Amino acid sequence: HMTAEQYEEKRNRKSFFGGTVDVWKKIVTVWSSINFYQRMIILATQTTIFVLAVYFIQQGGLTIGGLVALNGYAAMLFGPFVLLGRNWQTLQNGLVSIRQTEEKIFDTPHEIYHPQNAFSPAKINGEVEFKNVSFGYDKSTTVLRNLTFKVRQGERVAFVGKSGVGKSTIIDLIPGYYFPTKGALLVDGHDTRQFDLTALRNSIAVVSQEPVLFNDSIMMNIRYGRIDATDEEVIEAAKNAHAHDFIEELPMKYEQLVGERGIKLSVGQKQRIAIARAILRNPKILILDEPTSALDAQTEKKISETFEELMKGRTTFIAAHRLSTIRKVDRIFVLENGRIVEEGKHDDLIKKEGGIYRHMYEYQVGV
Ligand SMILES: Nc1ncnc2c1ncn2[C@@H]1O[C@H](COP(=O)(O)OP(=O)(O)OP(=O)(O)O)[C@@H](O)[C@H]1O
Ligand SMILES: [Mg+2]
């Protein structure tokens, strides 16, 4: 079936060709016909003037001086039209620019979704292994240093640590948004570099730290999780994500436009839309990047309840800011300077004298 990327590209093409280009082509056609008729009119008028002038001069009603003046007036009258014709070139240039834009937008190299001899399973199990993974966004800085750990199918793990330590970076490696600079990341034993990215991402749902909503209806925004889902399935997912109630209160309900051209939603509402998307997707690997901004207690409780449901039977990665949400996970990784410095269950980590996690926990609960 169609992926969200394919849907979005089709939409871009449609609005580009259906909108801009068509309008331009119409304008250019009108202008070029103006150019043609204008020449014809000038030619016809000049011929008429000439014939009439010869006639009037013969009759003695017009002097040669009068003819010169008449020609001058005619030139004044047609001058602007000639100028208009010259602008033809500018319009042609515009058309060339549009063609270039078209090439830029649609012919730029895509991410390599289908590498040669790609591993392209219909379904994945959801085992994830980091093998000596180091990563930096550029050559001069290293964000992750030599991470090694294995997450079993269905296991729930969480990453904690200071802002900027690399929690979001780690989980962005899993769907192949980035690849390790050193070492390898294996999903079901296969390097993500070798994966068919469409196949990999079809089995992963991401609820990102700042969920992105598209300039489209709420209905379509949820449907991004699975482009061929029915309206009923979308509404069902919204109910499970505790999003249905607030959607019903919007002026246009599910048809409400959101994003730049629509209404603004709060971070908590956006996350619930993103969770509904994830539910629709029914993934084997689930990734939750907690928002940094504080949610109100009620929304937070609702989101964590939903999430509890969603995590069942799926390998789950959480980048956590609130330690309360990760008490029940199987393993917590504490990060510092790009390395894992502590690892274990919440109950064990809080017992560790002088431990970093314990310190963070005490700070958050206000001991
Ligand atoms: N796209 C990017 N390009 C370049 N540098 C980046 C990019 N994204 C993150 N970084 C840098 O990488 C480091 C790790 O960032 P990351 O977003 O993974 O931290 P985080 O632990 O998720 O922080 P937070 O708790 O605030 O969400 C930071 O120094 C950040 O500035
Ligand atoms: Mg982050």
Image (tube, rainbow, N blue to C red):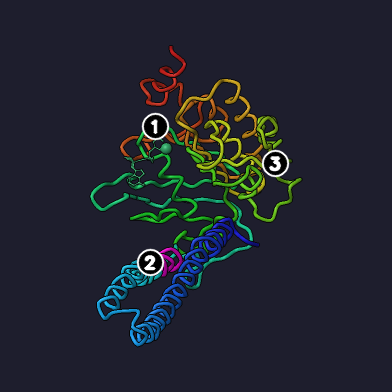
Q: Identify the residue position indicated by label 2 in the image.
A: 94
Region of the chain picked out in magenta, as a range: 98-108
- Judge whether residue 101 is colored magenta: yes
Neighbour class for label 2 at 10 Å: few (<14), some, many (≥20)?
A: some
Q: Is residue 149 above or below residue 96?
A: above
- Alpha carbon distance from label 1 to label 2: 52 Å
Please state which amino acid type lies under the numbered disc 1: Gly
Dominant secondary structure of the residues highlighted in magenta in the image: helix
Checking the image for residue 237, the label placed there is 3
First in residue order: circle 3 vs circle 1: 1
Of residues 245 and 365, the one drawn nearer to the viewer in this rendering: 245
Please state which amino acid type lies under the numbered disc 3: Ala
How far across and down, in percent of the image, does residue 205 sit? Answer: 57, 47
Of residues 51 and 213, the one drawn nearer to the viewer in this rendering: 51
Q: Quadrant of ligand 1?
A: top left
Neighbour class for label 1 at 10 Å: few (<14), some, many (≥20)?
A: many
Of residues 280 and 37, the one drawn nearer to the viewer in this rendering: 37
First in residue order: circle 2 vs circle 3: 2
Checking the image for residue 161, the label placed there is 1
How far across and down, in percent of the image, does residue 275 sit? Answer: 61, 39
Q: Which of the 4 quarters of the picture holds residue 333?
A: top left
Q: Is residue 170 above or below residue 98?
A: above
Q: Which of the 4 quarters of the picture holds residue 180?
A: bottom left
